[in-house]
Image: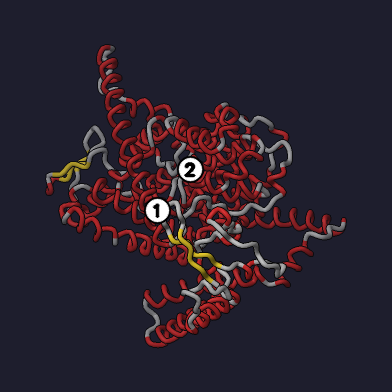
Amino acid sequence: MQTSRQNKDNEIPVTIISLNKLDSEGNRMPPVNSIKDVKIATTLLTTDPDQMDKDDDLVAGGREFFIDRLFDKGKDFVLKHKKRFKQIVYSVLLLLYIAYVVYSLSFRFGDEGAWRLLICTMLLVVYLGWVIIKTLSGYQSFKKSLGSKNPESITKAKKVIRWALYFVVLTLIGVYIGLTVVQTRPRNLISLGGIFVFILILFLMSNNKTNIKWHTVFWGLSLQFGFALVILRTEWGIGAVRWVTDRFMEFIAFSDNGSAFLFSEKYKEFDIIFKAVPSVIVFCAAIAVLSYLGVLAFIIKKFGGFLGYCLQTNPVESINAVTNIFMSGIESLMIINEYIDSLTTSQIFCIYTNGVSSIAGSTLIVFANFGVPVEYLLTASVMSAPAALVAAKTAYPSEESNSAGDRKCSIVNRGGPDSLIQALSKGGMQGLQLMVNVLINLLIYISLFAFVNAAITWFGDRAGIEELTLQKIFSYILWPLAFIMGIDAIDCLKVAEMLGVRMFATLALSYIQMGSYFNNKDQYNKYTALYNNTVLTSSGDIFLPNWNETLKNGILTDRSELISTYAMCGFASLPSVGISLGSFAALAPTRFNELSKMALKGVIAGTIASYITACVAGLLFS
């Protein structure tokens, strides 16, 4: 019942509404004589029409249409069975995709595109199958039963199996080296000696030699040897790496369309600004999408779990080592941010060493634009993960157990995007910020490096030493390290020079020089295919008479190219200390003082990890 009344103060008509219906006990509400007497329960103060009582007569002026009730019932039904509807939609889409794959493969099979479609489909099926299996109650029960009992007989059996595996793996490696390396390429044994030298250096600098887990060292090196054996010595492994590299570069090449649209076709004249920067932006956007969809988390968690199981390292350490293959140091720290405060000092050191022992996937694009082969960078990044764990756990072994080691580490994505479009945009912005930092560092370090070189040259001239430079000093100091890695003696000075620049300046400068050697090699091969007259100058340059072209600093041998590319594949350098410590200070300020005391040791361990990777590659070079 409604009545109208005039308010005498301001002459505003007031409508009095009977609120008997709102009394939960069925008692009649007291009469309303003025606006002050009207009290509305807080539960009714809502602006969401979906939360209002559907039986209330206040809807649509006292009437509720049939279509509104039908829509509300349909909406309630969908929300009630939301999970079931999603499963049906996804199942239909999956069946449609499988039908497309079957038809496409039956229509045309045998070319590269068919194999690409088949491999991608198999990976998709494995991923979806694992997601489904995890949700099954039987799998959860089986998983719990594995760790519920640990009889003494099982413990003894594990020890027997472990020592048996030691013997089998060591025997297989020894037989392979004896039959293939000693008899065909004895020169590669220098790299084998380099592995033992670098392990010895890590042992001597270790803070607690009695706590070193040689199980971790053995299986880390064994995994590296296995990766290198597949990648460098098997036809299908070499073919797989080339296929992945071609697909990778094929995807990155699409960024040229955006560069041409924004900067016109003249963008090719400026490789770094108008070619490398857009490539990195597109790559980071793709990585952000994979992270949003959960694909990246799946890869990192499974590979990290595999490393942790084989090397008996903390799950956080193992996952962080794998994360650094795909992400920069700051992003990989954000993945494990919630665990940092509970880690031990040894584990913090391991996290730091992981970050400086490899290069991020986005930076790989930059170095590829300098002329360095992508397949070398890809394989070196993967092989660096176990090497970083070996170096960290030898230089700073764990002293005590920690609660974080007993927990299951999950992939954390705090403040992540809410949609696919937002992931694309956020990833692109991260790529732009990354390239801004790279360009600023390049500008600063190239300028400062030129200034320091000019100063050293000036002081050398005062003492009668001509053309004294920082590179020349590095080349003589680091010559022994280059040699024991397996670099050909004729190239040791050149490679040692790049190793010094990488250690004391920045990695980008080293790969710029490395890219020039690869470009020189391409030009040299093209020239020698047509002519047979080249001139080697006293400064090491190669002059091509018929083309009137000089290849500055000459070329490297194939062995030296491979080993040096692997040896430099890591961010460990003195300037990187400040950047890494800044990242830790922002994400884990309570551990900053602790890490700052061992940052230099971490840089040395990260550098040696890259050198061990180079030695393994040199041992299997063919």
Tell me which residue sits at (54%, 67%) in the image: 17
Which numbered disc covers residue 330?
2
Q: Residue furthest top?
A: 462
The N terminus: image quadrant:
bottom right
User: For this rendering, which residue is in front, 418 or 585?
Assistant: 418
Q: CA distance from mark 2 to mark 1?
A: 14 Å
Task: Pinpoint residue 433: horizontal percent, then vertical percent.
Answer: 36, 44
Task: Pinpoint residue 569: horizontal percent, then vertical percent.
Answer: 44, 44
Identify the mark nearer the N-term, 2 or 1.
2
Residue behind mark 1:
427
> In the image, what residue type sits under mark 2?
Ile
Q: Classify mark 1: helix, strand or loop.
A: helix
The C terminus: image quadrant:
bottom left
Image depth: mark 2 or mark 1 in front: 1
Q: Classify mark 2: helix, strand or loop.
A: helix
> Is residue 400 rendered to the left or right of residue 370?
right
